[in-house]
Image (cartoon, rainbow, N blue to C red):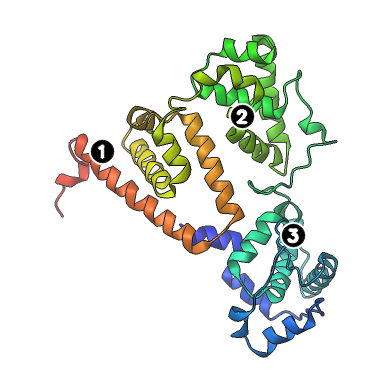
């Protein structure tokens, strides 16, 4: 599963090998010595200490303008090397490969750092926004204009409130709208999400959903929000990654055995679906911003281990799996 994820993120290995044979001139980054050391001794890559801009994840030893120039030149070389007409998607893929190669050559061939770079610049490189990276520009974009006075943050807060058991009437009163207006708002915001080819609205909605408990109009309703505002399990879910992965595995196993996984977590840990989703958004954002393939693999393996353990538990509670009695 992780291998597929990493291949999707970094590109097909065979395609990358093909690009290695293409003509390429890396040019000269601002710090020429860095590039020369990489060419002279590949082992020095592991010893070289690079610094990166915390927003763009470009190396601080060169300018973005220099990088774009060299990457675009390599892209043109890739295009010149093609014998047949390419679709726009094929061209986009070639451009992405060019940017990847130059980035790796200029920044020590670190695949985790490449992943951070691609996520931080996903809108520019792929046309899609990655959650956890502030690439969404709401100001001046009509898709982010409030609908009947309800902003995207308002909409996410209302949705979050409903998952906490707050009645629709209470929420609509707090936001100063009636059910007819809410009916339209609840149709039009999802429609805008569908209209946005960058998935920016959806990513921003997820961020706002996670931040919903801090919405000022929910302050008076706070005592009713969540099944455990004082719930130690919820606090543990926010701070203990292993506990979070365990409950993810348990929820998946529950659904596999015909149970409502979200309700199972409510019944056993007092954590509502809304709270769980908000915490999941926080973990995903942190994971994206501090991408580490080894840690990600470790947590995925742990979640799968827990899924199997809970699957055995649910199977036992239901009298065992159907296949248990079959002999071969």
Q: CA distance from mark 3 to mark 1?
A: 46 Å
* Spot occupied by residue 148 in the image (x, y as percentages of width and height): 76, 18
* Residue 55 seen in the figure: yes
* Residue 157 vertical position relative to residue 282 in the rendered view, above or below: above
Mark 3 nearby-residue class (10 Å; few <14, some 14–19, many ≥20): some
Q: Which residue is mark 1?
A: 314
Asked whether 321 or 147 is in front, the reply is: 147
- Give the label on residue 92, or none: 3
Q: Is residue 304 left or right of residue 229?
A: left
Q: Quadrant of residue 120?
A: bottom right
Q: Earlier in the sequence, mark 1 or mark 2?
A: 2
Count of numbered marks: 3
Judged by depth in the image, the label closer to the viewer, 3 or 1, is 1
Mark 1 nearby-residue class (10 Å; few <14, some 14–19, many ≥20): many
Q: Quadrant of residue 247?
A: top left
Q: Which residue is mark 2?
A: 214
Quadrant containing the C terminus is bottom left
């Amino acid at each position: 599963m992780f291998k597929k994820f990493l291949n999707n993120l970094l590109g097909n290995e065979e395609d990358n090998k093909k690009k290695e044979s293409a003509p390429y001139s890396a040019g000269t980054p601002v710090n020429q010595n860095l590039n020369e050391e990489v060419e002279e001794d590949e082992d020095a890559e592991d010893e070289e200490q690079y610094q990166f801009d915390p927003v763009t994840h470009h190396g601080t030893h060169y300018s973005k303008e220099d990088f774009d120039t060299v990457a675009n030149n390599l892209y043109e070389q890739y295009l010149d090397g093609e014998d047949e007409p390419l679709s726009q998607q094929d061209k986009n893929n070639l451009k992405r490969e060019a940017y990847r190669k130059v980035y790796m050559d200029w920044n020590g061939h670190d695949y985790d750092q490449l992943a951070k770079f691609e996520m931080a610049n996903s809108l520019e490189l792929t046309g899609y926004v990655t959650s956890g990276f502030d690439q969404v520009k709401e100001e001046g974009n009509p898709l982010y204009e409030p609908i009947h006075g309800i902003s995207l943050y308002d909409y996410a807060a209302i949705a979050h409130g409903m998952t906490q058991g707050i009645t629709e009437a209470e929420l609509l009163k707090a936001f100063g709208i009636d059910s007819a207006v809410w009916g339209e708002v609840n149709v039009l915001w999802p429609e805008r999400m569908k209209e946005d080819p960058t998935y920016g609205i959806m990513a921003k909605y997820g961020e706002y959903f996670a931040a919903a408990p801090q919405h000022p109009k929910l302050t008076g309703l706070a005592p009713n929000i969540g099944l455990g505002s004082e719930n130690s399990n919820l606090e543990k879910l926010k701070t203990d990654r292993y506990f979070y992965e365990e409950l993810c595995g348990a929820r998946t196993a529950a659904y596999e055995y015909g149970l409502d996984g979200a309700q199972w977590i409510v019944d056993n840990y007092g954590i509502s679906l809304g709270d769980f989703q908000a915490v999941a958004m926080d973990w995903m954002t942190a994971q994206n911003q501090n991408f580490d393939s080894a840690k990600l693999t470790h947590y995925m393996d742990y979640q799968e281990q827990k899924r199997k353990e809970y699957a055995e538990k649910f199977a036992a509670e239901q009298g065992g799996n159907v296949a248990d009695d079959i002999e071969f």
